[in-house]
Structure formats: C-alpha cells, structure tokens
Image (tube, rainbow, N blue to C red):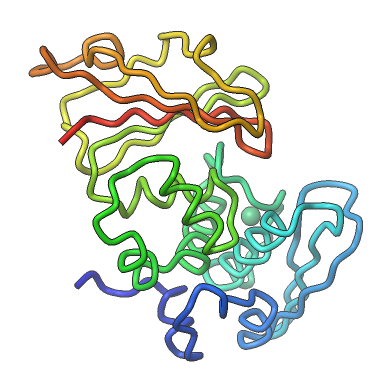
Amino acid sequence: MTSLSPAEELLQDIGITEPDEIDVEVIAWSVGARVRYRALPQGDARIVGMGDRAIITVDDRASRVRQRFSVAHELGHWHHHRGQRLICHGSSTDSADDTCEREADRYAADLLMPRFMLEPSMAEASMSFELVNGVARRFQVSRLAAALRLADVHTGRFALIVDEPNGRRWFRRSAALPRGWRLRLDVPMGEQGGEPGFQPKQWSVPAYRLFLGRNRSGIQLRCETLHAASGQRLTLITVPV
Ligand SMILES: [Zn+2]
C-alpha cells in the first residue's frame, strides 16, 4: 500500500472516511484555520497566518466546488509553507508553475480525493469522462480537478489535453502511458469539441497521429472531449487495453 500523504493522514486523524464527510471548514478548524467568505478583488482565496492560527478568505462569488478547492489549496499552504510570505492567487490546477502553488494543489487533491476513498470507488472502471463525472459528483470537485486526480491515480493508459480559453494548451499523462510516447500538441482538436453542457463527443484516431515514439502502429486511440465549467476544453485520449 502506498504511504499516506499529509492531507490523507489528517483525514484519517480526524476520522473522516467518506467523501461526503470531507467538510473543508471543519477540517480547516481542526488545524487552526477559520474560513470566511467575502468578495475578493483578486484571486479566489488567500490565507493570513499568525502563530498557529490562520484565516482563509474565499471569494463568495465562486462556485461551491471552486470554493472547496480553494480552501483545500490554502490548507496546503498552511501545511507546507507556514511562516513564509506567499502571494497566492487561489486554486490553479492548470498552470501552477510555481513550486509552492503546485504543492498546495497537490495537497488539495489529496484532501478532497484521498486515494483511500478514490481507489475503492473507481474499482475496475476504465478511464472515461463518465468516470470523471462520477468522481466529480461524489467528491464535489470540478471535472477538471477530478480528471487530473485520475491521471495521478488511475492505472489506465491515457493522456488528458487541456485547451485554455486563451488558446494555451497543456497536458497530463497517466503513469501507465508508454514512456517513449510523446504527445503531439500541435494537432488541432477544435473541430471535434462538443458544446458546453452536451454529452462528451467520442471519436477514434490512429496512435501515430497524436503521438511520436515507437510501437504505435496499428493502435487505434479512443478520444473524448468535453467542456469544463471554467471554460477549458478537456480531451481524453485513451490507449485501449
Ligand atoms: Zn496558492
């Protein structure tokens, strides 16, 4: 069994065993942080600490799933970066290139979707947006957060491409995807995209079209795309078993 991360340890210490018990305000309270909701001029959330007490302020206009992720992210800073001066713009699952932000995002994913709850709940389900939607509902997180977490935890072979509204494209790959395969990020995916709120569209494509590397011939990839609430388009590329 994999060892527990700090966030997963905290959940176990306070006796949380089910997704619907992951109440971020109660968890914050247990580590000395109070959560309040206000309109913030910038960013989704911030944390101010003094000694062993902190106040987390979350933008009251954000969606509930975003607020939960923001609180969990700030708790990540409280755990990892206490006493440091941080300029935090809240949750940033997409482009966190700063180490502190990545650590806080990692903590948030561990806290909101701990492995010891997620792994049994996904059982043998293959990777798909149906699974992503199920995880998002059950753990009250965004579909993007659920998809990124599954890229960490799921044993399937897949990659997730995220197209930002500003045109930037980035990706995450699962650990099981063949190591030598390099994703071609220049291949347009726009025409296959579904509209917001629609069921994900599905299509298939030969592996050589989307990946560079060896042993791709004859492999047909399964692709699905959907629009996330935050305006991103997610494309899931799965290598069949
Ligand atoms: Zn942060």
Residue positioned most to the front:
199
Please tell me whether residue 129 is drawn above or below residue 88 in the rendered image.
Answer: above
Residue drawn at x 48%, y 24% as measured from the top left: 201
The total of numbered circles placed on residues is 0
Please tell me whether residue 214 is drawn above or below residue 154 in the rendered image.
Answer: above
Q: Is residue 208 left or right of residue 166?
A: left
Q: Is residue 143 left or right of residue 154?
A: right
* Quadrant assignment, res 100: bottom right
Please tell me whether residue 201 is drawn above or below residue 174 in the rendered image.
Answer: above
**Front residue of this view, candidates 172 and 206:** 206
Residue drawn at x 72%, y 84% as measured from the top left: 53
Report x, y in % for residue 208.
22, 11
Report x, y in % for residue 11.
48, 81
Report x, y in % for residue 93.
56, 45
* Quadrant assignment, res 123: bottom left
Please tell me whether residue 26 is drawn above or below residue 93 in the rendered image.
Answer: below
**Front residue of this view, candidates 222 and 25:** 222
Residue drawn at x 29%, y 52% as measured from the top left: 125
Q: Is residue 6 left or right of residue 179?
A: right
Q: Quadrant of ligand 1?
A: bottom right
